């Protein structure tokens, strides 16, 4: 059976709730089963991709370390919403992932190309 193309859409910041962690866990599970997966960080989800996160003061596990495992699981296709980066004054050089900045039109194309959309 052919695998479906999955696009995981991450909309939440990495800390303050369990949704970002759940999204990363879903991505790693899909990667472990050799599913064709792309991940898009949009809106506040772009905060997940920031390099040099320090979560010791809030006593939570560092989300960046979890994302660094993506490559080991074959998850190499990642995107970040360019407008969200601009709105939050985040330079692409500050990203911990090799995520490609994409505009709204490109995001729409990614949505259309996917067989399955998972939004967290």
Image: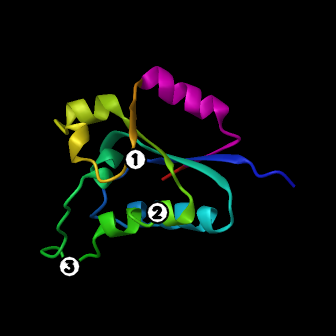
Residues shaded magenta: 104-118
Q: Residue 24 bears which disc, if any?
A: 2
Q: Residue at x 27, y 64 (%)?
A: 16
Location of residue 56 with respect to 115 vertically, above or below: below
Q: Is residue 92 magenta?
A: no
Display colour scheme: rainbow
Q: CA distance from mark 2 to mark 1?
A: 12 Å
Q: Are marks 2 and 3 in contact (CB under 8 Å)?
A: no
Element carrying mark 2: helix
Q: In what quadrant of the picture does the N terminus appear?
A: bottom right
Q: Position of residue 30 (x, y in %)?
A: 62, 62
Residue under pointer 1: 11
Res 92 visible = yes
Q: Is residue 7 left or right of residue 88?
A: right
Residue 93: quadrant of the picture: top left
Q: Is residue 107 left or right of residue 4?
A: left
Q: Which is nearer the N-term, disc 3 or disc 1?
A: 1
Q: CA distance from mark 3 to mark 1?
A: 22 Å
């Amino acid at each position: 059976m052919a695998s479906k193309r999955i696009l995981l859409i991450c909309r939440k910041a990495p800390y303050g709730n369990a949704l970002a962690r759940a999204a990363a866990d879903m991505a790693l599970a899909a990667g472990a089963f050799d599913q064709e997966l792309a991940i898009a960080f949009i809106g506040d989800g772009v905060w997940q991709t920031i390099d040099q996160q320090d979560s010791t003061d809030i006593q939570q596990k560092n989300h960046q370390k979890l994302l660094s495992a993506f490559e080991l699981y074959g998850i190499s296709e990642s995107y970040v919403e360019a407008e969200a980066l601009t709105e939050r004054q985040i330079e692409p050089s500050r990203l911990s992932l090799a995520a490609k900045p994409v505009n709204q039109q490109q995001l729409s194309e990614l949505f259309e190309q996917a067989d399955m959309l998972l939004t967290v």
